[in-house]
Image (cartoon, rainbow, N blue to C red):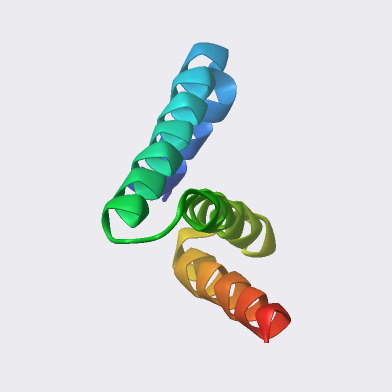
């Protein structure tokens, strides 16, 4: 039986207008995250890069987990871990 997450993802994938709204919302999250980072003292470039990388790790996690909600959080965490390893 599909979870609420799986039903939502299927509905969004099958409806272009919902997909567009979802993508717009994700972009708004990035904008808000960058603003929060700037308010917390990050410079513009760092705030923008960090917010974009956060969204990228989310997308990577979705791909690596086959968008399986049971594996999604661990896959996103793994993406952040790999990013951290690259940065060192």
Q: Is residue 15 left or right of residue 40?
A: right
Q: Work out whether 13 lies above or below 73.
A: above
Q: Nearer the viewer, residue 28 or 3?
A: 28
Instruction: Specify the farthest residue to the top.
Output: 17
The answer to whether any part of residue 35 appears in the image is: yes
Q: Give the percent coordinates (x, y) of residue 10.
A: 52, 34
Quarter the C terminus occupies = bottom right
Q: Give the percent coordinates (x, y) of residue 76.
A: 53, 67
Q: Give the percent coordinates (x, y) of residue 47.
A: 46, 54
Residue found at x 34% / y 44%: 35
Residue found at x 72% / y 79%: 86
Residue found at x 67% / y 56%: 63
The answer to whether any part of residue 11 appears in the image is: no
Q: Nearer the viewer, residue 82 or 72?
A: 82
Q: Is residue 10 left or right of residue 36?
A: right
Instruction: Specify the farthest residue to the right.
Output: 86
Q: Give the percent coordinates (x, y) of residue 80.
A: 56, 72
Q: Is residue 52 left or right of residue 87?
A: left
Q: Work out whether 28 lies above or below 84.
A: above
Q: Work out whether 38 lies above or below 84.
A: above
Q: Nearer the viewer, residue 46 or 26?
A: 46
- Give the total of numbered labels: 0
């Amino acid at each position: 039986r599909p979870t609420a997450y799986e039903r939502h993802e299927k509905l969004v994938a099958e409806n272009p207008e919902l997909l567009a709204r979802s993508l717009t919302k994700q972009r708004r999250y990035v904008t808000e995250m960058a603003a929060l980072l700037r308010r917390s003292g990050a410079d513009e470039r760092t705030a923008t890069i960090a917010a974009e990388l956060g969204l990228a790790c989310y997308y990577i996690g979705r791909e690596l987990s086959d968008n399986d909600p049971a594996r999604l959080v661990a896959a996103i965490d793994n993406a952040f871990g790999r990013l951290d390893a690259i940065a060192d």
